[in-house]
Amino acid sequence: MLKVKNLTKTFKSGDTTVSAINNVSFDVADGAFVSIVGASGSGKSTLLSLLGALDKPASGSVEVSDQNISEFSDQQLTNYRSLNIGFVFQSYNLVPNLSAIDNVMLPMEFAGTPKAERKQRAEELLAKVGLTADKILRKPTRLSGGEQQRVAIARALANKPKIILADEPTGNLDSATGKLIFNLLHDLAKKENTTIIVVTHDLSIAGKTDQQFKLSDGKLQK
């Protein structure tokens, strides 16, 4: 269970304090597929950074499995992100000089997983996200945008995270491929019992998630 309580994040702009996230509270069940929608500048990406322990709140808390990650030290946060959070980005963020399978193996290498186990899990994950065996040895530049995003999703799943955070994962894809990636994430949430939180501008996609949160000026809209 993910529990967000009275979460607030502020920034200084000259002499003014701006609330990027303003007293936000919500709960998300394990294995749920959740969307966060809102206009540009509404605080979506800031909220995702707080949920992923990439940033610390000014006040409030983020609890995962009854652990308040807002109180973790920097080293605890690094370990927590490595083992509990998977990230998927609009721009894929794959390592260009590594093959698809090596990109997926990389997080497991950082986590100390033995090489044979890394390779086996990477092959299984790439098959699960629908990347054919003839393409797993290709570098990102030899894959389509949809294929690169499939690799990025497999990489995010590598260390069996509790939560995957996806920031506009279909933003660089055509609508048909975007729907395929969305459906893939939806299926993975159920089959892997992984909580998936997606930031999206696409309301047609957001409307099909288990929960939808709308942000406006850093506040949740009812």
Image (spheres, helix red, strand yellow):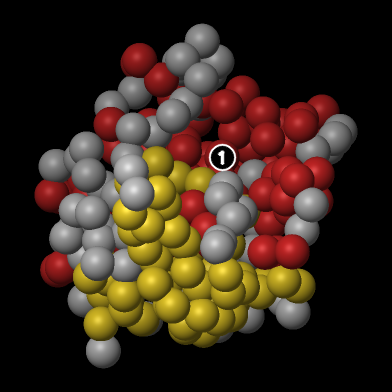
Apparent side of residue 40 relative to residue 62 in the rendered image (left or right) = left
- Where residue 172 appears, as percent x and y from the top left, is 22, 37
Q: Nearer the viewer, residue 143 or 222?
A: 222
Q: Is residue 67 visible?
A: yes
Few, some or many C-alpha atoms within 10 Å of disc 1 (few <14, some 14-19, many ≥20)? many
Q: Nearer the viewer, residue 95 or 38?
A: 38
Q: Residue at x 71, y 32 (%)?
A: 119
Q: Residue at x 64, y 45 (%)?
A: 158
Apparent side of residue 65 relative to residue 76 in the rendered image (left or right) = left
Q: Residue at x 33, y 43 (%)?
A: 14
- Where residue 137 appears, as percent x and y from the top left, is 52, 19
Q: Residue at x 74, y 79 (%)?
A: 66
Q: In the rendered view, would you say 103 is above or below 218?
A: above
Q: Quadrant of the C terminus?
A: bottom left
Apparent side of residue 158 relative to residue 132 in the rendered image (left or right) = right
Q: In the rendered view, would you say 156 is above or below 6?
A: above
Q: Quadrant of the N terminus?
A: bottom right
Q: Nearer the viewer, residue 124 or 204?
A: 204
Q: Residue furthest bottom?
A: 222
- Where residue 105 appears, as percent x and y from the top left, is 67, 31
- Where residue 157 appears, as percent x and y from the top left, is 59, 50
Apparent side of residue 62 relative to residue 174 in the rendered image (left or right) = right
Q: Nearer the viewer, residue 151 or 40?
A: 40
Image quarter of residue 209: bottom left
Q: Which residue is mark 1?
A: 155
Image quarter of residue 30: bottom right
Q: In the rendered view, would you say 149 is above or below 162?
A: above
Type of the residue with mark 1: Arg
* Element under disc 1: helix
